Image: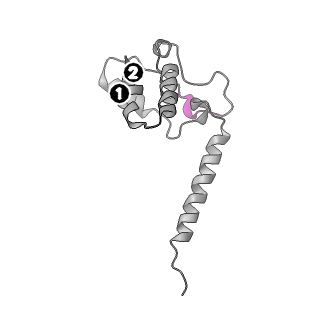
Amino acid sequence: TIQYMVSEVQYGGKITDDMDRRLFSTYAEYLISERSLAPDFTYNPESQIGEIPNEFRYSVPNKNEHADYVRYIQEFPEEDSPEVFGLHPNADLTFRINSTNSLLNTLGETQPKDS
């Protein structure tokens, strides 16, 4: 039910392309399942290439109190490792280089033109 709520109800209506909706549903099937609710489950890769800040463990917490969930959320690293999403650490470097180039290009385009 949670899988359906996320992939079809919450986000599915916002995805207009049928292939994108199928892809998102596939991700939801993989990431939101009974195995992801097991106490020993983690989204961390089994063999890491890079380091995850503070050796944070990405998992589904089993808490009873709201304050415990808030504390868990506050422990999240400020920058997630690309490996948690199945990407190589170089993906982060590529993203940052592209973002910087885009920012510098935009700044260059906003400079006043000489007449």
55 sits to left or right of 36: right
Task: Classify residue 6 by image quadrant.
Answer: top left
Task: Report x, y in % for residue 25.
Answer: 48, 25
Residue 89 badge: none
Residue 53 in the magenta stretch? The answer is yes
- 50 lies left or right of 105: right
SS for callout 1: helix
| Type of amino acid under label 2 | Tyr
Q: Position of residue 67 (x, y in %)?
A: 31, 26
Is residue 16 rendered to the left or right of residue 115?
left
In this rendered view, identify the residue nearer to me: 15 or 110.
15
Which structural element holds mark 2?
A: helix
Which is more toward the observer, 7 or 31?
A: 7
- Residue holding disc 2: 4
As rendered, which of 91 and 73 lies closer to the eye? Answer: 91
Q: Which mark is residue 9?
A: 1
Position of residue 15 relative to residue 103, above or below, is: above
Determine crowd level at label 2: few under 14, some 14-19, many 20+ residues with C-alpha closer than 10 A.
Answer: some
Q: Earlier in the sequence, mark 2 or mark 1?
A: 2
- Please say whether residue 61 is visible from this viewpoint: yes
Name the residue rendered at 49%, 20% in the picture.
29
Q: Residue at x 63, y 52 (%)?
A: 97
Q: Are marks 2 and 1 in contact (CB under 8 Å)?
A: yes
Residue 103 screen position, x and y as percent = 55, 60
- Counting from the top left corner in percent of width and height, residue 47 is at 67, 24
**Colour scheme shown:** one colour
* Magenta stretch, residue numbers: 51-56
Callout count: 2
Q: Residue at x 32, y 17 (%)?
A: 64
Residue positioned most to the bottom? 115
Residue 98 in magenta stretch: no
